[in-house]
Image (cartoon, grey):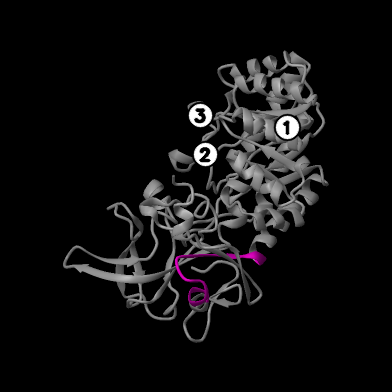
Amino acid sequence: MLNPGQEINNEGQLIIGGCSAKELAEAYGTPLYVMNETVIRNNMRAYKEAFDKYYGGNGRAYFASKAFCTLEMCRIAKSEGLGLDVVSGGELYTAMKAGFPAEIINFHGNNKTYNELKAAIEYGVGKIIVDNLNEFRLIDTIAGELNKKVSVSIRIKPGVEAHTHDYIKTGQIDSKFGFAIENGEALQAANDSLRYSNLSLSGVHCHIGSQIFDVQPFKDAAVIMLNFVKKLSEELNISIEELNLGGGFGIKYVDSDTPKPFEQYIEAVSETVKETCKELGMEVPFVSVEPGRSIVGEAGVTLYTVGGIKTIPNVRTYLSVDGGMTDNIRYALYKSDYTVINASRADKNEDITVTVAGKCCESGDLIQENVKLPKTEIGDILAVLSTGAYNYSMASNYNRIPRPAVVMVKDGTHRLIVRRESYEDIIRNDI
């Protein structure tokens, strides 16, 4: 399996965005995150064009920055005309330092602090998505102190079942996020918002989960949310201007994954939105989504150098690399599937089965098990595909291992966008 912008050259080497994986490893060292700018921009444009086509511009895609948040990524999203979804003061600060327009930023989070909310209001973010009742009070207090009126949405749990890993389901009633419709708390929360004079409830938001391949859950969520919007209008006289249906669109990690083109999701849901609004006798609201993984996931590759090979007869062969759970925690968390290839010998027959292990002092520090590879030697470069989403974002300094560098490639050129951490970086805040 290869992703867009990847190929194998005549020497059997993996090429990413016109750049040799081996040469990138030699130039920047490993582990190394490699991001393909062309793929990122093409994905962003696909969403924007789909919204223009099916909503006539009455909508927007917001890049979910938690998937991959850097200054350069925020600059790219800005240049492509997308909005930005942030979930912390740090992501918000990064966006502002990158010159991102605050008015098209959505600020999420289930436990925003006073300081985070104050920063968001001072910056003038377009929408704060309220996740609990206390946030209404905090926002109203801060807005009053700053003499501002704040536009908010409320996060709703629509009760839609999304067939994905339990850890990344978010739309069911038993979730730390948002207010449930089925037990009446969502309606009560909306009613509670009317008590506060410094905020205005103008949107509703939901997110049903991640890595979803089926269109139907998104359509179901849209119907439920629109009926809730109608109820808010009739029972509380609240006019909702924006319906945010979140993200969660799946990508290809392995050959068996079957994601649909982004346009199919947008088209199918737009038809449902328009039909439902017609049935309910209401205007189609401004519709938005928040894709993250589907924009950057397949654009990313992580490169490693093989440092050790250990064969346990009749058990398994461990192939150890110079990274691990510090740069890819998802296998340890979710047993996430990945495609692993030998970037140095990608044209050879896959005739060995190995477990790719990281260098951390942890038995669970594995990147993938039962991997088919050609005969591999110490010093070979391994490439793990589809690591553009959440790998850099969730990286850590466990065992005091420095985080990898990030390189952006495009049309045969490459540039550093995040430098590799040094040991001095690791102790910088120690006292």
Sooner in the amino-acid sequence: mark 2 or mark 1:
1
Residue annotated with mark 3: 176
Residue kind at label 2, given as amino acid type: Ala
Range of residues picked out in magenta: 24-38
Sooner in the amino-acid sequence: mark 3 or mark 2:
2
Residue annotated with mark 1: 121
Q: CA distance from mark 2 to mark 1?
A: 33 Å
Q: Are there few (<14), some (14-19), or many (20+) residues within 10 Å of tag 1?
A: many
Q: Residue at x 16, y 68 (%)?
A: 313
**Residue 80 visible, this angle:** no
Q: CA distance from mark 1 to mark 3?
A: 24 Å
Q: Residue at x 68, y 19 (%)?
A: 190
| Residue 129 image label | none
Q: Residue at x 63, y 40 (%)?
A: 246
Q: Given this view, does label 3 or label 2 mark the residue nearer the observer? A: 3
Q: Position of residue 64 (x, y in %)?
A: 63, 46
